Image (spheres, rainbow, N blue to C red):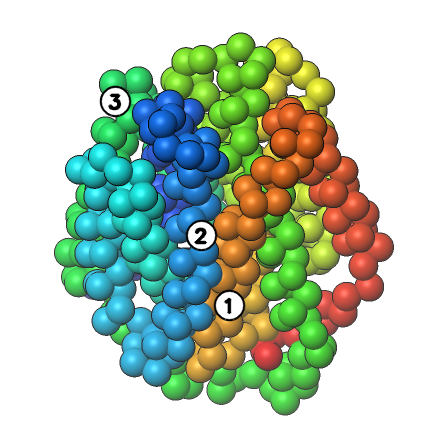
Amino acid sequence: MKEESKFRRFLLKLTVLSVSVLTIMSAATIAPVLPSLAKEFSTVPYAPFLSKLMLSLPALFIALSAPLAGRFIDQHGRLKLLYFGLILYAMAGTSGYFLDNIYYILGGRILLGCAIGITMTVGVTLIGDYFQGEQRKRFVGFQGAVIAFGGVIFTQVGGILADIGWQIPFLIYLLSLLFIPMVLVFLKEPDIGHQDSVHTQAEHQTPAGLLHKLYGTAILFMILFYIIPTQLPFHLNKIGVNQYSIIGTALAINSLGAVIGSLMYARVKRRIDFPHVFFIGFLLMAIGFFGVGVTTNVIITFGFVFAAGIGFGLILPNLNFWIIEITKAEVRGHNIGVLTTCIFLGQFISPIISEPLITLFDVSAIFPLAGGCLGLLSLAFAMAKLRTKNVTNY
């Protein structure tokens, strides 16, 4: 009976992780085809910019839908909306394979964003519901590693498929349909009514504004990080890389770094506090971004994008875990939804901010500029005096 319980617990974890990986699939599978999309629709005005919106436009609608999803699941339960999100994900994601109009494809990406707003919000919220204490810390880091490893796999597969045809990678989104039976069988609706009964009154004294600082950090973090998937393919084209499989490899190496960083997270977090995890993560990203911008050697570029990935792998679990830790179960869906909004709002804003700078300078110059901003963020957290004691609820 005990072995059966352990096995069911394993299947529950596997299902939550499967739902989580859908987030990275949204961008990873088509990031290598952006230059090909720009060429395919070259007669359309602003085709290069529109092709970059394939990655960033879903982020806007994730940002818009996630708080609504969070409020819904707080009031009506986690799993009801998850089924709808998984079906919508498959339908919207694969639409790019069947459509030959760039504006219609962008419409499909909008619906995909709504689906991800649902699945990501539910997935992170379920981690807070199902796990406690040290187990929660480990699982948050492991979730980040699985998401990043999914980026390695799906970016590489997307690059290979893109060499066959730019439409083919869109079919990967059908994978979400395989997760519906897993959710049905292995997940149960959490009982959140008494999850916070063990907390003391002191634990409810959250420093005012802490959530807002974390939300602001999430926006800045994603504005800067998302320069890699949106601009790195074009930077590599500029320095002479024209094979989509090599571009996919560069993006996959970045994701591999994120896997390493996420797997390190629980161990790092045991030794230092939340702000100093941010310090290390932003410093690694700063080094990586600056290095990408100043080298024209592809192999050295791989090393720098790997360093930036490690930083990402530390920062994202740190954001998720800190928000979960300071949030009561009854409003966990809402606060995770707002965090999701901030993360993907940053993704949407990123190319909008980058494009004028690229026009003013060039695509390669954006990387050292971003590295400087990341260095300032790292310095800010090194000097931070944020209170980190007695903040387990908000």
Task: Characterize the local packing of mark 2: few (<14), some (14-19) or many (20 or more) Cα atoms within 10 angstroms.
Answer: many
Picture layout, residue 78 above or below residue 341: below
Earlier along the polypeptide chain: callout 1 or callout 2? 2
Earlier along the polypeptide chain: callout 2 or callout 3? 2
Label 1's element?
helix
Q: Foreground mark, 3 or 1?
A: 3
- Location of the C terminus (image quadrant): bottom right
Picture layout, residue 242 above or below residue 249: above
Task: Report how far apart the C-alphas of labels 2 and 3 lie in the structure.
Answer: 25 Å
Earlier along the polypeptide chain: callout 3 or callout 1? 3
What is the x, y in percent for residue 160?
A: 31, 20
Looking at the picture, tell me which residue is in the foreground, 337 or 279. 337
**Residue 338 — which label?**
1
Furthest residue to the right?
A: 383
The amino acid type found where label 3 is placed reads Gly
Q: Judge left or right: residue 74 versus residue 322.
A: left
Label 3's element?
loop
Picture layout, residue 2 above or below residue 371: below
What is the x, y in percent for residue 327?
A: 54, 75
Residue 253 in view of the camera:
no
Locate residue 168: give its quadrant. top left
The amino acid type found where label 2 is placed reads Ala
Q: Foreground mark, 1 or 2?
A: 2
Q: Residue drawn 24% across and 50% down? A: 92
Picture layout, residue 238 above or below residue 172: above
Residue 41 in view of the camera:
yes
**Residue 59 — which label?**
2
Locate residue 148: give its quadrant. top left
